[in-house]
Image (tube, rainbow, N blue to C red):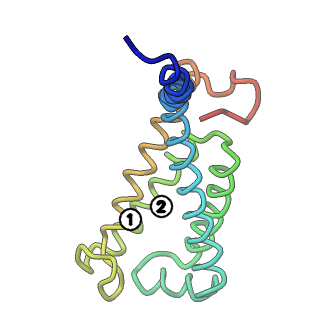
Amino acid sequence: MEDPAIAIVRNPWEIFMSSVETTLAERGQQSAANLLRISLGLMFLAHSVVLKLFTYGLAGTAGYFASIGLPAGLAYVVFAAEAVGGLLLLANVATGWVALALVPILAGAFWAHSGNGWVFSNTGGGWEYPLFLIVVSVVVALQAFAAQGAAAVRHPAKLGGAVQQA
């Protein structure tokens, strides 16, 4: 038989741990999805504003696009898509659709860096980082669609406005 004094000390701990386990089980998946979505949004925002606008400048970015055979004007489209997409991901607006819409931009980055080898620290940057971001974007989209249910994928306009919870 257990000493009543020990039972009093252990019971609050067991109650606390049970509560923690329940909370983690209920909220862990949603917290992980939010963390991944926010990280991806920050990455797109930083990549557009910090790298393309402040580091190279939009004209410099357009020059790079032209140097690899892409239309220079496409740099401005990519900048805008990354900046707006990053903000929308941070705000959790149409998360699944935004994440999927940014995949072609990442595929373009994958193509642009494909000749530089695997490691992104190679001269000119390799293709590992764009490939990883493609996977992350698809995962964020899948998580958002799973959280919204099948109706959200079939009829996104019927969700009661632009904001869709991930």
How packed mark 1 is, by other alpha carbons closer than 10 Å (few <14, some 14-19, many 20 or more), is: many
Instruction: Name the spot of residue 77 as percent of width and height, x first.
Output: 61, 66
Query: Which corner quadrant of the image does residue 15 belong to?
Result: top right
Count of labels in the image? 2
Instruction: Name the spot of residue 134 as percent of width and height, x first.
Output: 39, 55
- Could you tell me which residue is drawn at 40 percent across and 15 percent down? 2
Can residue 153 be seen in the rendering of this structure? Answer: no
Closest to the observer: 76 or 144? 144
Decide which of tag 2 and tag 1 comes sooner along the chain: 2
The quarter of the picture where the N terminus appears is: top left
- Callout 1 secondary element: helix
115 lies left or right of 58: left
- Could you tell me which residue is drawn at 63 percent across and 27 percent down? 156
Q: Which residue is mark 1?
A: 130
Instruction: Name the spot of residue 115 as percent of width and height, x first.
Output: 25, 78
54 lies left or right of 110: right
| Farthest right residue in view | 161
Closest to the observer: 19 or 8? 8
